[in-house]
Amino acid sequence: MSRLFDGLNDAQRAAVAHTEGPMLVLAGPGSGKTRVITHRIAHMVNEVGIPSSSVLAVTFTNKAADEMRHRLASLIVGRPPLTCTFHGFCARMLRRYGERAGFEPNFSILDESDRSRALTSIIKEMGLDTGHFPPGKFQHRISNLKNELTSPAEFQSQAADYFDRLVADVYPRYQERLKEQNAFDFDDLLFVFADLLRRDEEVRTQLDERFRYILVDEYQDTNLAQYAIARGMSLKVQNLCVTGDPDQSIYGWRGANLNNILHFEDDFPGASVFRLEQNYRSTANILSIADQLIRQNSRRKHKELITDNPPGSRVRVICYQSDDVEANAIANDICEGVEVGGRRFGDVAIFVRVSSLTRPFEAAFRARHIPYQVIGGYSFFERKEIRDVVAYLRLTLNPKDDAAYLRAVGSPPRGIGQRTLERLATHARAHGISLAEATANVSDVKSIKGKPAASLRSFGKLLRELEEIKTLAPAVAIDTILSLTAYRDQLDDLPEEERQTRLGLLEEMIGAARSWSVENPEEDLLAYMEQAALTSDADRRDASADVVTLMTLHAAKGLEFPIVYLVAFEHDILPHQRGVEEGNEEEERRLAFVGITRAREELTISYTQRRLYQGRTNYMSPSPFLAELPDDFLDREDRADDWREGADSFADDYSQEPSWEEPSIPLVHGASGPSPADRFYRGMAVRHPVYGQGLILQLEGAGEDRKATIEFPSVGPKRFVLCRAPVEPA
């Protein structure tokens, strides 16, 4: 047996050795899935003799694709196979076959801002108020329709209510606007390519014959369009291998269909199934609570979670009085671990259900000078300077890209006002030409004269000069843009610190482009732009930086850290209220499972009695998922036992006239501070001398009149006035 099988367990060896026919690899967290994927491909190419050009590996993030490429480069003799994201693969294929769908190969890929701007323009043209009909709502609906492979024409007959009928009007106009600009949005890359595969048998046959072995990673996260692409390329030759874990399907809100992996064996009868159940990442205690939690779900494929790792420390579950107390305690914990315990800041990650929950942690970290990075916040490619340069690159490569034109023409400022641009756009629309073409012939625009016309002529001259960058390396092209536009000069009037920061961002962009060219010597500027358009903030996380990582649970997928804090583990946050209301509690549980299984050595789960959330101070109750975790592997700690701790800040909250979520807590006129009854909260475990232990189901009133409905296993629900009842926290 070759060295490719060295160090693999029995299940991994079996999966690596299997090459022909459809196969499903059910891979638990930390089970060495990437190693199995890359060693299987290397075995196919090096030892079975399958040409690497016949193999396609598709995954979901650039980070995962890069890791796979680097591993394959060290394993495979000769050129590695094509390895990319779904969107990257579709973009590549549409560069080649896009003309069959009515697009030129130099198309642009619009970002979220450009997409929103286009929809805003269309909504206003229809005479609608964007305040009452926000573009984001249309954007979300159209995105879902594309992921469901529903065309504008098909949706016309499906629109049922008033808003859907508006969408039915906006959707075709939006698509026409994109086509005029020779542009795709992210969803179009999948939608247009899936449609091309469906209706163009010649393209489908060519790709079926070229990619005879296809591997799709994270198959549980595929939507209908991605499913259609994978199936459409595996009709004749069914060497489709999919890997994934139904227990880690957490993207239903953006169209992922869990049934794709659950029903794989129905789609491909006789498919071979391999289960990777050995976990190499987490301690036994962490894995045990994860396993017990996910067993509560019914829509899954059963597998054991086993490990030879030591038990490790027990998982801590801590209750804090408030979110600020929680953040400060965790910040102190991190500092102590670094100063005394020999830890690095980079060992630590804090996971939140929604990004707004990072606020108190950022404040606590800044106060203690703890270095940190927030993933899922402001992306590098969303910064103004970077977007300005990208606009010039896009416009040079695709002169029909009006969205890029509108950004470039004002950066740096040229004295071309909004009214001039509206007149230019009116002329361009009337003559069926782009803004760049209208600028090149500005003398034909009778409504623009004098200084505005001269400014547009100057800009048109600049665009002609920039045409030379099409053949340059990306880093050289960027530097040329900065020089010809004198972009750096406009930063001279800024305060020195801000000026240096922005110049630093531009230099970082040039450096990153140079590194990209070294890693991709055969790719051109168009390929660089494609990569830039499809890069997410999570892809740019610096794993080597010695900083604490703050991120959402969704962004944490695929990562691992020695120390994890899973915070705000509270009712209506995790599980999220909307998820429960929409019947997606199992996905919320999967999200908690993903967070838990990112931890290698230490895991702390925390919740609070009250939290500033969605602009209001709310009484919180523990997540019901906590009751599903086995006590044998937990250390529970109540740091909010003394309700008077932090009473001053509690009184401060009262002075700010907070609004409380259910149950409502009205202000008591003349009250000097909180009542002892205020220490109780919904979901709290309490003890009564006669009825024993119970759980608070409901609270109402405030101060001495505060009442609680408590469920006791022995007698059922009982109602008490808390200040008069012999009820104490359990």
Image: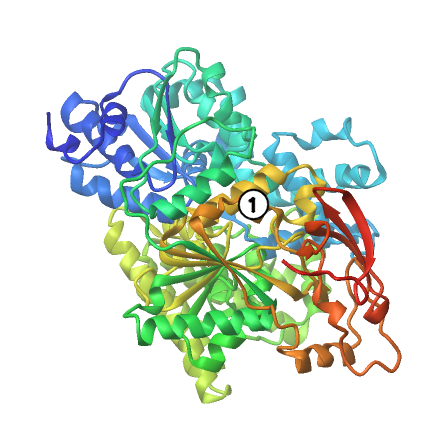
Amino acid type indicated by mark 1: Asp
Quadrant of the rendering where the N terminus is positioned: top left
Q: Looking at the image, is 264 positioned above or below residue 634?
A: above
Q: Looking at the image, is 339 positioned above or below residue 686?
A: below
Identified at 79% across, 63% down, the residue is 722
Identified at 26% across, 29% down, the residue is 12
Q: Disc 1 designates what residue? A: 185
Position of residue 621 measured from the top left corner of the image (x, y, whole percent): 66, 56
Q: Looking at the image, is 77 positioned above or below residue 605?
A: above
Position of residue 188 measured from the top left corner of the image (x, y, whole percent): 56, 39
Position of residue 510 measured from the top left corner of the image (x, y, whole percent): 34, 66
Provide the secondary structure element on which disc 1 rests. loop
Position of residue 633 measured from the top left corner of the image (x, y, whole percent): 43, 48
Residue 202 appears in which quarter of the rendering? top left
Front position in the image: 626 or 641: 641
Quadrant of the rendering where the C terminus is positioned: bottom right
Front position in the image: 67 or 179: 67
Front position in the image: 458 or 59: 59
Front position in the image: 257 or 134: 257
